[in-house]
Amino acid sequence: VTIIEDADELFLSSAQEALRSTGGDGAMEALGWRDLLESVDEVPDARLGVFAFFQAQGRELGSSRALGELMAHPYGSAVGEERALTATVERRSAQRGSRCVVVGEPSGGVLIDRPGHGIALAELEALELRPIGLSDGLVLHEVESDLTSLPMSLNEAQAVPLRSRSMQLGRVALAYEMLGAAEVALAAAVQYASDRKQFGQPIGHFQAVRHLLASARVDAAALASLARQSADQYPALPSMRDAILKALAGRNGRRICEKSLQVLGAIGFTTEHEHHRFHSRILVLDSLLGTSSTLTHQIAVTLRASAGTVPDLYPSAGALRGN
Amino acid sequence: VVDPFDEKGLDLRAAYLFSRIVTVYGGSQQMQLDTVAKQILQLPA
């Protein structure tokens, strides 16, 4: 199931091919990741290329340092480092609360965001990292070190504007990766509905199955549309857009996987079938940089605090209304 | 929180009731899902 078309599709297929043949970090090299990253703020095509890499990573269940490097990009010049840095990513779990994780194989300098305190730059060997075993191939390490002892490279006042950009990039990237994983889960279910026969005909003939898959496709289209709009508008994203996009990605990604599983039936719930790997990837990504439920709550709190005045979340809709 | 019987509440109620018909314009949700299933997902008819 292809959501985004044309030139984007060309880069997307190249990224998928590179991920299949050389793995995550090799694919970054092959696709000119450093050049893309340098132009991410100014050149729309470079930005789309960066985000397409994440969509490809979702489709191929690849693992790389791309997310950490993308989120470190806004801090690079401010901390006076020319080498590639990796930013840790906030992960929240019900059992362990908020934790810092490194996505992909860690290397070099690690930027650790401590909201309220600033940004710390630590060398990898100085950190205690605990690997987290995941079935979807994503390499993830949780930082176990005592973060309060780390010296700050940027104070809180310096960090605030950069943190916002870093968070926006990270959330848009995660939305694209969830979209990619959801697309493949849905495509597998569509194929199964066309192949599997019951009562003498493919199960995709029956309305109950057709409508499940069609509503999953609607969820994917809505996510693709908002992700693309956000990629186009960065770095001038409307208020709360990154939170809205990430919340939508988490919700729709999960819904697409759940609907696909209903169509696949019991075969989709076996370790032999690949469905669980894509579902797992979406659940893990939903836990990074705010889950869909916590972000939805935060958005509601912000709206209530606006004292009855609903912020213009979609300026483009205002333009359509002639405002 | 809106009082359902004051002027604003009555306006919102009317807008909500009218919004129901909008979901049917151009084909109900069921019709649209059938179109998506057939034209985009190309599931067997």
Image (spheres, coloured by chain):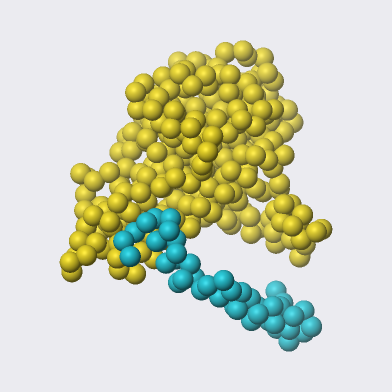
Q: Is residue A39 left or right of residue A263?
A: right
Chain seen in cyan: B
Residue A214: quarter of image: bottom left
Residue A149: quarter of image: top right
Residue A3 coordinates in the image, percent (x, y): 48, 46
Q: Residue at x 37, y 45 (%)?
A: A184
Q: Is residue A190 visible?
A: yes
Image height check: is B28 above or below A297?
Answer: below
Decide which of A243, A318 is in the foreground and name it: A318
Q: Is residue A281 left or right of residue B23?
A: left
Residue that extends furthest to the right in the rendered view of this protein: A323
Quadrant (top left/top right/bottom left/bottom right) for the C terminus of chain A: bottom right
Residue A28 coordinates in the image, percent (x, y): 47, 22
Q: Is residue A257 left or right of residue A200?
A: right
Image height check: is A124 above or below A159?
Answer: above
Image height check: is A217 above or below A142?
Answer: below
Q: Residue at x 47, y 52 (%)?
A: A220
Decide which of A26, B43 is in the foreground and name it: B43
Q: Residue at x 48, y 56 (%)?
A: A219
Q: Residue at x 47, y 25 (%)?
A: A65
Q: Is residue A112 visible?
A: no
Decide which of A124, A51 is in the foreground and name it: A51
Residue that extends furthest to the bottom in the rendered view of this protein: B5
Chain seen in yellow: A
Residue B39 coordinates in the image, percent (x, y): 43, 58
Total marks shown come to 0
